[in-house]
Image: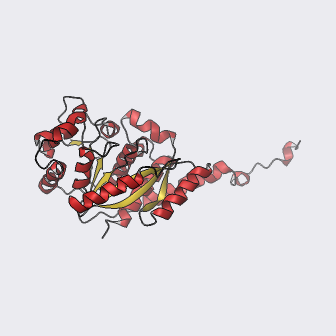
Amino acid sequence: MKHPDDIPTDASSFDDTPLARELSEISRRRQAIDADKFPLPDATRVFTVANQKGGVGKTTTTVNLAAALARNGARVLVIDLDPQGNASTALGIEHRSETVSVYDVIINDEPMAEVVQKSPEFDALYCIPATIHLAGAEIELVSLVAREQRLRTALDAFLAGSDEPFHYVFIDCPPSLGLLTINAFVAAQEVLIPIQCEYYALEGLSQLLTNIRLIERHLNPKLSVSTILLTMYDSRTNLANQVVDDVREHFPAEVLTTVIPRSVRISEAPSYGQSVISFDAYSPGSLSYLEAAAEIAHRGAPA
């Protein structure tokens, strides 16, 4: 046993511990994000965030990227197209059944300007909420004229009539490939696909890409898969690292360098009606979403 006199007492002796290295890395990332000035796009970038698999972090990604961009100077709109309304909840937006919502926009031709709400998160963050009525919209859309283009028509009119330009629009889709998701693909120019770093991560992806190509060919020639984001990453497992390598090999140009870790703070934030960006701005999960947003901003829209 060491004598007390032999135990080092200077702080430098603890600088190389795992905890100290982690804290130092978080501090470095925080300073880099605070110093980064996100460029603003010349024209509105419209993203559909989609994956037909549930539980991949789709809504979480939508909300936190939108909040991260709004925090750093962009004017951002989130369109909640999922009947569960989780994006609306996470942004602190009212979406009870009687709330005028995206359902009224798509089915009843309600102008988006009458539906949009400002999120309490950031002054430049807005949301078109979803309510439970959206669950029946798939059936109601079948008989409507131009059923695949109703969201695009409403969004184009809203953006054209807005007093201030929006820099980004994020459309959160349901985990299916029905008419609501088709409306989202037709309304967007870019598709962002979250892929979880778990077994079967690529399952169903080929079918999703096939459908996106069909929509590009027949309904929206401007659509492209511009961004893939790896989520729920656990660096301690060989599986997660293998998934990262596989996805990067298949989609070298689309995959962001940033990966989103599994994080308790990311999971907790929605229960407080917040994104993790405002809930715990400098937690590792929040920093990862801020870094992913910075990548998206610096990359710019595909040519």
In the image, what residue occupies the spot 53% across and 54% down? 243
Horizontal side of residue 80 vs 143, given as left or right: right
Q: Looking at the rendering, in which quadrant would you find the N terminus? A: top right
Horizontal side of residue 265 vs 95, given as left or right: right
Q: Quadrant of residue 134?
A: top left
Residue 303: x and y in percent read: 30, 70
Q: Nearer the viewer, residue 142 or 158?
A: 142
In the image, what residue occupies the spot 30% across and 55% down? 47
Looking at the image, the residue that sits furthest to the bottom is 303
Q: Is residue 286 above or below residue 44?
A: above
Residue 152: x and y in percent read: 18, 52
Q: Nearer the viewer, residue 288 or 71?
A: 288
Horizontal side of residue 272 vs 25, given as left or right: left
Looking at the image, what colour scheme do you see?
secondary structure
Horizontal side of residue 302 vs 109, given as left or right: right
Q: Nearer the viewer, residue 110 or 298?
A: 110
Residue 127: x and y in percent read: 25, 44
- Residue 86 seen by the camera: yes
Count of numbered labels shown in the rendering: 0
In the image, what residue occupies the spot 10% across and 47% down? 145
Q: Quadrant of residue 91?
A: top left
- Residue 220 seen by the camera: no
Residue 123: x and y in percent read: 27, 47
